[in-house]
Amino acid sequence: MEFSMVDHPPCARHLGDDVAIAEGGQGRTMMFVPKPDTKCLIYTVWWRNNGGNSTQWQMEKTISLDSDCVIEGAVGRHLLLYYVGVSSAKQGCYTQDVDTLQLERVCYSCPKQSQVYCNFPPSLLSSPTVSSGKSV
C-alpha cells in the first residue's frame, strides 16, 4: 500500500462538500469535487510523471450530475451516488464508471436507509483473509 501527500485542487471548497477519490484508467487517481454554487462536479486528475509522484492536480473536464444526486464515495473505478429526487422512478443508489461515465442502478432505497457496498462477496481465491485468531 502506498501513501502520498498532495495539495488539494486549486478551487473553492465549502465545509461539507462531497469529495470522492477514485482510480482511473492509465494509473491515474481522480478527485471529484463539487463546483461552488452549481450542481456540477469538477473532475480533476492526478497522475504519476515518469515514475515520480506529481503533486499537482490537473483539471481534465467537468461533468454534470442531476441536482438531486449526492456523492456517497468511491470504490475502485466507480463513484457511488445516491439520488434523492422527487421522481420515485430514479430514487436509489447508483454506481458511475469514472472512465466511461456509464451509470448503473444498484438498488432502490427511499428514504435512504441502506449503505452501498460493491465487490461482495469477494473472490475466495484472490482476497486476503482476516482472522480473529480463534479456532472454530
Image: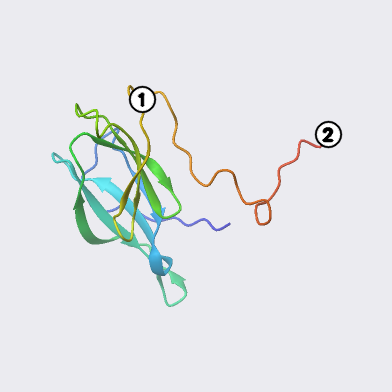
Foreground tag (2 vs 1):
1
State whether residue 69 is above or below residue 31.
above
Can you name the residue that lies furthest to the bottom here? 50
Distance Cα–Cα, label 2 vs label 1:
37 Å
Residue at the spot 45% in from the left edge and 31% down from the top edge: 115
Residue at the spot 68% in from the left edge and 56% down from the top edge: 125
Residue 131, position as x, y percentages in the image:
75, 40
Q: What colour scheme governs how the chains and residues are painted in the rendered image of this protein?
A: rainbow
Can you name the residue that lies furthest to the left here? 37
Q: Amino acid at mark 2?
A: Lys
Residue at the spot 35% in from the left edge and 57% down from the top edge: 30
Q: Nearer the viewer, residue 79 or 36?
A: 79
Instruction: Report the side of 64 relative to 58 (left or right).
Output: left
Q: Nearer the viewer, residue 90 or 21?
A: 90
Q: Quadrant of the C terminus?
A: top right
| Label 2 neighbour load within 10 Å: few <14, some 14-19, many 20+ | few
Q: Secondary structure at mark 2?
A: loop
Q: Residue 84 has which mark?
A: none
Who comes first in sequence, dot 2 or dot 1?
1
Q: Residue 112 has which mark?
A: 1
Q: Amino acid at mark 1?
A: Lys
Q: Quadrant of the N terminus?
A: bottom right
State whether residue 47 is above or below residue 82.
below
Residue on which the image places disc 2: 134
Q: Secondary structure at mark 1?
A: loop
| Label 1 neighbour load within 10 Å: few <14, some 14-19, many 20+ | few
Q: Nearer the viewer, residue 19 or 107?
A: 107
Q: Quadrant of residue 50?
A: bottom left
Residue 43, position as x, y percentages in the image:
26, 55
